[in-house]
Amino acid sequence: MPDRVFTELQRDALQEIANLGMGQAATRLSGLLNAFIELSVPRVRVVAVSEAAAALREMTGIDGPVAAVRQGFRSEIKGEALVICRSGEIAELGSLVGGRADDRNDDAHHGTPRDDDALTEEELMFDVANALTGACVSSMLDQLGRMPIFSQPGLLGEAIMLDQVFQPGLLAWDVALLVEVNFALEDQRFRAHLVMLMAEESIHVVSRAIDALLHSL
Amino acid sequence: MNAPAGLPSLSDLVVERVGFGIFVVDRDMNVLMWNRFMQDHSGVPADEVIGRPIFERFPDLPRAWLTRKVESVFQLGSFAFSSWEQRPYLFQFDHDRPITGGVDYMQQDCTFMPLMRGRDVIAVCVTISDVTHVSVMQREREEAVAQLREYADRDGLTGIANRRYFEARLADEFQRWQRYGGELSMLLFDLDHFKRINDEFGHMAGDTVLRSMAQRVSGVVRKQDVFGRFGGEEFALLLPCTPLDDALYVAEKIRCTIADEPVEVQGVIVPVTASVGAATARTGAPDYEGMINEADAALYTAKRQGRNRSVALA
């Protein structure tokens, strides 16, 4: 039923907007990480939050525990972005985001001062999530003529199940526009999934913005 | 809103007086703006940093990290963040909490904002908020939770483990024993004729006896054993890696520790003895409750045989 929020025409347009946005995001991320980034063709779906976990399990093929970072974005269109990856895969990113994950305790153990430029695993996860969210959400909203402001990323959990990610009490949304895109790095096993969640009100703004865009063509 | 020529605009005044740090850098990390908060906390006035690379006056900054953060904002055109929980501070600023706060420097949340002209990022604005109070509160909360957890495991009167905690540890040890084998024993013991002590000397005296016995026995148990109050005048001792023979030896030691010296309560000498039942985990036992029942039966036998003794069912 939630999928009736958009007309077929609007959904096609939204898919196109997401494609363009992600293309742009991939270019920017490749520049930042100095590596070839593959961003999948985004899958767009409107679901009730109670169905979100199941929808996402199906879209990502993830059944086990995940690490999830949430981040709010705000403009006339506002919502939350979640970056989800399999628990424990973050560490494999190593030097890609520029720093390397290090173990502070280990440093303390050896009595050497902590290298201030090294990243902890949690910091690395926030950086990856923030870069993905920033690039993808900005690029998509840019297509709709909006420039969002982001809030600080927060950790939902390091090893939680998708059902826990979408606990109705944790997220403020009833209906969610899922824009699932997965992000892979050349020659790396690491995969991250970005999901955008928007409340009904923002979904209506998106719908109007799409109409405006379609009219201007 | 435009101010008359030569006078600062309203936004200039706000940036100047606002309660968090604001500064702007270009892609080469030259400082373009530096507000009053930054000046007050760093001791470096705006005219000494503006137009220069930020690292010139602040060589202690995490150079590669900060450069990378700023560069990511230029490249992606979107925000970047840093939280005190991962990186307690960017600048070494003093905080206004008393020293008892337990944090060395002002804890900071930083936001890196792209300043856009059209679609180009022309500079990056960094804001620094003082979140020292949040970090102090969080630590206090963590300490309170740890303390609550500790209380939840302790018996209020004697300060030793309570029954809930004892059984939880027994369940753990029993599971370990089921998986890896070895030896696992436990004792249940009960102060003899405790009701008489209560009746004769009053409940306060009874409580004192319980406390002092708990303390005495605590002094003779091994560190890896779990000693708990099982209820009323009944105590339990969990003995990991201990066969039944050794458990009986421990039982005798405890019985003697209790009986050898009477307790003095408000000038009155109260003799106390205890009966002890020992049990061990036996092959094929389905759960730890069986062990408790066996110890209980042994304890009952000790009572029936005349008290002040240790018994194990063969």
Image: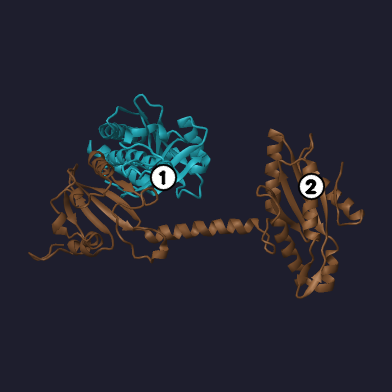
B102 up-or-down from B200: above or below: above
What is the display colour for chain A?
Answer: cyan
Horizontal placement of A23 versus B230: left or right? left
Q: Which residue bears the numbered disc 2?
A: B249
Image quadrant where one finds the N terminus of chain B:
bottom left
Horizontal placement of B209 versus A51: left or right? right
Q: Which residue bears the numbered disc 1?
A: A108
Q: Which residue is farthest right? A: B305
Q: Residues within 10 Å of mark 2 (few under 14, many from 20)?
A: few
Q: Is residue A93 visible?
A: yes
Residue type marked 2:
Tyr
| Relative image position of residue B71 (x, y in whole percent) | 24, 41
Q: Nearer the viewer, residue B237 or B50?
A: B237
Q: Residue at x 76, y 47 (%)?
A: B186
Residue type marked 1:
Ala
B21 up-or-down from A110: above or below: below
Tag of residue B179: none
What is the display colour for chain B?
Answer: brown
Q: Secondary structure at mark 2?
A: helix
